[in-house]
Amino acid sequence: MTYQYTYFIDRTLGKSIGEALQEIGVKIEFHHAHFAPDAPDTEWLPIVSQRGWIVLTKDVNIGRNILEVQQIARYQAQVFVLVSGNLPRQTMINIFVETIDKIERITQDN
């Protein structure tokens, strides 16, 4: 499959998940390449959204913080959250690799 979108790997996921997705041809941008390690989500969400990047994260609090929710709504960010974020790293890699095609289809439909 050819992947149409660029995916932003936030700091909670780390490098290995993004690298695994790159290996199958997914375009990836890493948090650390664009923002300080402690940059608040409210700082990078507008920028990432305006660039059309799709956010991949395991930060379940991103949907609970009112300022972050407002940023997501205002900039129409597309965010996919792995809600079982305490899984072993390899399990998380497998989940994203196995579901990226579905994420791509959902993104195309919205």
Image (cartoon, rainbow, N blue to C red):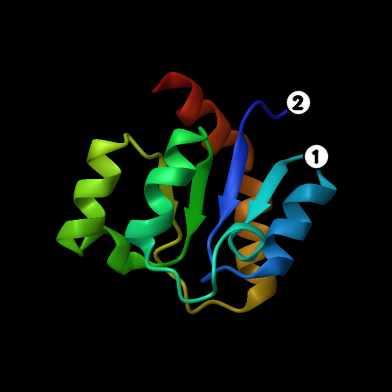
Image check: 25 left or right of 52? right
Residue 2 bears which disc, if any?
A: 2
- At horizontal 32% and vertical 34% (from top left) the residue drawn is 76
Residue 106 or 36: which is nearer the viewer?
A: 36
Relative to 95, is 99 above or below? above
Q: Residues within 10 Å of mark 1 (few under 14, many from 20)?
A: few
Q: Is residue 32 left or right of residue 66?
A: right
Please identify the residue farthest to the left as the structure is shown.
66
How far across and how far down the image is residue 72, in percent?
29, 45
Residue 44, given in percent of the width and then of the height, sits at 43, 55
> Against 52, is 37 above or below?
below
Residue 56, percent from left and from top:
51, 53
Q: Which class describes the residues within 10 Å of circle 2: few (<14), some (14-19), or many (20+)?
A: few
Disc 2, SS: loop
Q: Is residue 11 above or below residue 74?
A: below
On-image quarter of the C terminus:
top left
Residue 78 got which mark?
none
For marks 1 and 2 on the same chain, the one whose residue lies earlier in the sequence: 2
For the point 51% across and 32% down, which residue is it?
52
Q: Nearer the viewer, residue 85 or 68?
A: 68
State the image quarter where residue 91 is shown: bottom right
Quadrant in the picture for residue 74: top left
The residue that mark 1 highlights is 25
Foreground: 78 or 37? 37
Residue at coordinates 37% horizontally, 62% vertically from top-left? 41
Amino acid on which disc 1 is placed = Gly
Q: Amino acid at mark 2?
A: Thr
Dot 1 and dot 2 residues touching (CB under 8 Å): yes
SS label for mark 1: loop
| Residue at 33 percent of width and 66 percent of height | 60
